Amino acid sequence: MRRGISMPILAAMAILSASNASADVLYQKGSFADQRHFLAVDVSWGALEIGQADSARNRLVGVADVSSSTGAGSRTAKLTYYTPPLRGFELGASYTPMPRGNGDMPDPREAMHLVEAAVRKTIQMGGINTRLSAGTSRARVRGDSRRLPRQSWIVGTQFEWQNVTLDGDLRRQEEADGVSVRSLNAALAYGRGAMTLSLRARRTLPENGAASGHYLADLAYHITPRWQVVADTDIDTGADSLGTVIKVGARLVF
C-alpha cells in the first residue's frame, strides 16, 4: 500500500472503532481503463467517499446531455457523503477543494471550492421504474474560465420500461463571466439483443443570444462481444457549428 493513502485509512478505521459502528472500508484502485482511487466507508448513518470518485450530483441526477459534463470529473479528488435511502429518497453532497488537471479535471487556477448537492426519489409503478432528481452546484472560478460554471441547478426525470429508457432535464447555469444559460435536454434509448439505439436532443437558450439545438442519433450492432458496427448522425444548429456530420464504421472493444 502506498504511503499517500495510509493516513486516511488509519483515520477512518480509528473513527469507526471509536463509534463501534459496523462498516466496510474499501480502498478501490481502478483498472488501466478506469484509474480511480478512493476510500469508501459505508455505515448505518450513510456512506462516505474520499478520493477520485464520481460526485453526488453526477451519480444521483439523471442527465440527458449531448455534450460533456461541466462538473469535476471522477478522477478529481473530492469528499462525498450519501444519506441512507429513506422511503425511496437519497441525498448526497460533494466538496472538491481544488480541481486540477485538464479536460474533465479543471485547472486549479480556474476553479476552487466546488460544492455539489443532489436528491433523488425512486418510484416503482407497475412495470415502470421512475426516478425524479434535482441537483445544484457552486464554485469559485476565474472570470475567463470556460471549464466550470460559477453556479448551476438541474431538475430531471427518468422512466425505464422493459428495453426503453426515457430521460429529460431542465438546467440553468451561470458562467464565469456572469452570463446565464438555460437548456432543455431529452434522450430516448432502446436496446434489445445485439442492437442499441439512442436519440438525444439539446435546446440551449442563452440569456443574450440566439437559441441553438444539438441532436444526436446513434445505432450500434454487436456482431461479437468485441466487434460492433456503429452509425451516428450529429446535427448542430449553433452559429459556429459544423452543421450535420454522419459517421459509419466498426468498433473493436478491448
Image (cartoon, helix red, strand yellow):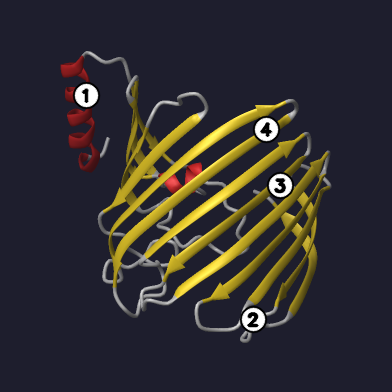
What residue is disc 1 on?
Answer: 13
Separation (CA) of disc 2 from disc 3: 25 Å
Amino acid at dot 4: Asn
User: From the viewer's perspective, is 144 left or right of 202?
Assistant: left
Give the quarter of the image for residue 105: bottom left
The answer for how far apart the CA atoms under marks 4 and 2 are is 35 Å
| Label 4 vs label 1, nearer the camera | 4
Q: Is residue 15 left or right of residue 162?
A: left
Q: Amino acid at mark 1?
A: Met
- Residue 130 place in picture, x, y as percent: 65, 36
**Helix, strand or loop under label 3:** strand
Foreground mark, 3 or 1, reads 3
- Find residue 238 and name its label: 2
- Mark found first going from the N terminus, 3 or 1: 1
Cα separation, mark 3 vs mark 1, equals 42 Å
User: In the rendered structure, which amino acid carries the disc numbered 3?
Assistant: Leu
Crowd rating for badge 4 (residues with CA inside 10 Å; few <14, some 14–19, many 20+): some
Give the crowd class for mark 2: few <14, some 14-19, many >=20 residues within 10 Å: some
Residue at 50% across, 24% down: 87
Vertical order, 182 against 164 (above or below) = below
Q: Is residue 194 left or right of residue 14?
A: right
Mark 3, residues whose alpha carbon is within 10 Å: few (<14), some, or many (≥20)? some
Q: Secondary structure at mark 2?
A: loop
State the residue position of label 3. 166
Question: Of label 2 and label 3, which has the lower sequence position?
Answer: 3
